[in-house]
Structure formats: C-alpha cells, structure tokens
Amino acid sequence: MVLLFYSDTDAPEPWRDALALGLPELEFRIWPDVGEPGRVSYALVWRPAPGLLATLPNLKAILSLAAGVDHLLLDPQLPDHVPIVRVVDAGMAAQMSEYALYGVLHFHRSMQQYVAQQRHAQWQQLPAVPAAQRTVGVMGLGVLGSDFVHKLLPLGLRLRGWSRTPKTLSGVSTFHGRAALGEFLARTEILVNFLPLTPDTAGILSASTFAALPRGACIINIARGAHLDERDLLSALDEGQVGGAMLDVFQHEPLPAEHRFWHHPRVIVTPHIAAQAIAELMVSQVIDNIRRIEHGDQPLGLVDRRRGY
Ligand code: NDP
Ligand code: OXD
C-alpha cells in the first residue's frame, strides 16, 4: 500500500514518521518520487499540481491536508470517481478560534486606534463599548465556525451566524441562505468568515456585502482569499465603510510584496497561518480514515462534491 505525499508548505518528515508508527505496512513516498503510479492507493496532498492526481490510476482516496478542498476541486483533471476526504478539526478548530478571538478583541477593544495613537505618543481615551452592545457575525457555522461561536459566547458579545441550511445555536441569532444575508449583515459590526470556497461563496466579501454592514464594520477573513474582492475592500477602507481588516488568506499567496495590504494602516496581514496542519494532531484521523477505507467503511470528512465542501 503506497501513500504519495505532496505539499509546498508542509514538511513531509513528521508525516512520514507518524504514519510509519501507526501504519507500518504503508510505503510513504514524497512527490516527485512517485515510483510506479499504479501502486499509489492514497494521495495526502495540499495544493497538488493540477493534473497530478489524474496520473495515479488506482487511487482509493484523495486525502486533503486541509479542511478546505477547493485546492483539489479546482483541478480540471481531478479524477471524478475517487473519494475526497477532508480534515475535520484535528487541531484546526482550536487554532482558528484563537486567531478569530484575537481579531475580534483587537477590533472590539479599539486596539487598531490605540496602536496608531502610540506611534504618535498620543494619550487619548476612546469611548468604551460594552460587549453586550457589540455584534459579531460569523459566516459558516460548520466544524470551525461553530467551535469559534462556542468560545466567543462567554465574552458576552452579541452573536449572529449565517449558514446555508438552518441552524439552532443557543445564544446566537442564526440566519441562512442568500435571502437572509442582508438581514444578517445589517447589524454585524465585526464580520468573521469561516466559509468553504465554492461557486456560491466565491467573491462574497465584496462591495455589496460591505455596503450592507453598518459603517465602520471590521472584517476578519480566515477562510479563502477568493472569498474577498481585494479592490473592493481597499475602496471600502478608503471610504471608511470598512473600519479595519485582519486577513490571513489572499487571492495570490504569498501576498505580492507590492500589494497595498502590506502597508495599509488598517489592515493586518498574516501568511495563511490561522490554522496549520500539525501532523501529530492530524495523523490519527488520517490513519483512521485509511483503515476505514481498507475495511470498506465510509471515512470521516467525506466531501460532497456537488455541494463543493
Ligand atoms: P464545514 O464544512 O464544517 O462548514 C462550512 C460551513 O459553511 C457550514 O456551516 C455551511 O453551511 C456553510 N456554508 C457553505 N456554503 C454556504 C453558502 N453558500 N452559504 C452560507 N453558508 C454556507 O467547514 P469547516 O468549518 O471545517 O472549514 C471552513 C473553511 O475554513 C474551510 O473550507 C477552509 O476554507 C477554511 N480554513 C482556513 C484555514 C486557514 O488557516 N486560514 C484553516 C482551516 C480551514 P451548512 O452548515 O448549512 O452546510
Ligand atoms: C485548510 C487550510 O483549509 O489550512 O485547512 O487553509
């Protein structure tokens, strides 16, 4: 049984070592050392080169090294008969929630303004806004978005959530579907994006969304760069419709050195680290899924290709 590993950001060694312990019968190969393509049963991948998976004729499953699978579904030659399995939490929920909590508190406690004031040695108290008068809106209430909501609840902020299908979450005003997007946005002062990238969600953070938010609302995008229209955001920041943005994902990664986001005083840039694939936390899910597939059982995190996530 051969597993092919491909990632331009994740080191293969921790995966090789952890898989050797849990599945000693597995032969671990690192792209481009594919060996005989017909012997590869599993591909454990992040952003594989388009067309690569189509060269492996006997794949039993494509195992995404990420929660999002847009990096696979965008491949025009993706084999359509091979199941795609995504990461379900496995250490990501805690990291994503930490990042988003940090971002929410940054904007809620006016840290953007205080950091700017410090640069000018300016001692100036701004009006305090009680948590109960601040509204945070979470787009995507799946594995990661719902973990965040549960961790945010004890802070006493007003919470709203938006998903594709209806959800009931204690302490959260929930909305679903495009028809309710405007109502969801209308009172959202800090918007956090946890959506998967699909044809329905691409470009969702654009001028019309920003215009539907209260003036000065802040944006935290930790899902995918293609959710965000970067030019629309820059215009909305310049006009004051958007007050600030914390961005982890971008249309082009790495973010080009000349991009305006790098030096924008009201934008925080991080290099796609809201959650990272930590092999020691994720490997048991990968091993369990390989065992399930070998026994003819359904793996955890099987992607519904029609939905796109
Ligand atoms: P899930 O599949 O568990 O949750 C997705 C959520 O989005 C669901 O609530 C779903 O609604 C909702 N959704 C999907 N399509 C729509 C739509 N058209 N309109 C409204 N809501 C929609 O995914 P995860 O929580 O595990 O992951 C979310 C995303 O986070 C990943 O796809 C990835 O892009 C991103 N991510 C980013 C990382 C980073 O480091 N920056 C790290 C990890 C993930 P419903 O519940 O009704 O199905
Ligand atoms: C993911 C990511 O989707 O790391 O897991 O971006």
Image (cartoon, rainbow, N blue to C red):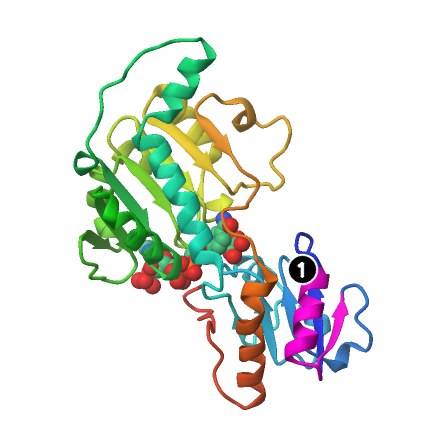
User: What residue does disc 1 label?
Assistant: 50
- The answer to whether residue 173 of the structure is visible from this angle is yes
285 lies left or right of 243: right
Q: From the viewer's perspective, is 129 left or right of 275?
A: left
Residue name at image x 55 percent, y 45 percent? 272
Quarter-of-image position of residue 89: bottom left
Q: Please provide percent x and percent y for residue 286.
A: 57, 73
Residue 78 % position (x, y):
61, 68
Q: Is residue 17 magenta?
A: yes
Front one among 309 and 161: 161
User: Which quadrant is home to the N terminus?
Assistant: bottom right
Looking at the image, residue 265 lies above or below residue 49: above
| Residue at image location 58% in from the left, 62% down from the top | 65
Residue 2 picture quarter: bottom right
In the rendered structure, which segment of residues is drawn in magenta? 12-30
- Quadrant (top left/top right/bottom left/bottom right) for the C terminus: bottom left
> Based on the displayed image, in which of its 4 quarters is residue 131 positioned?
top left
Residue nearer the viewer, 278 or 69: 278
**Residue 28 on the magenta segment:** yes
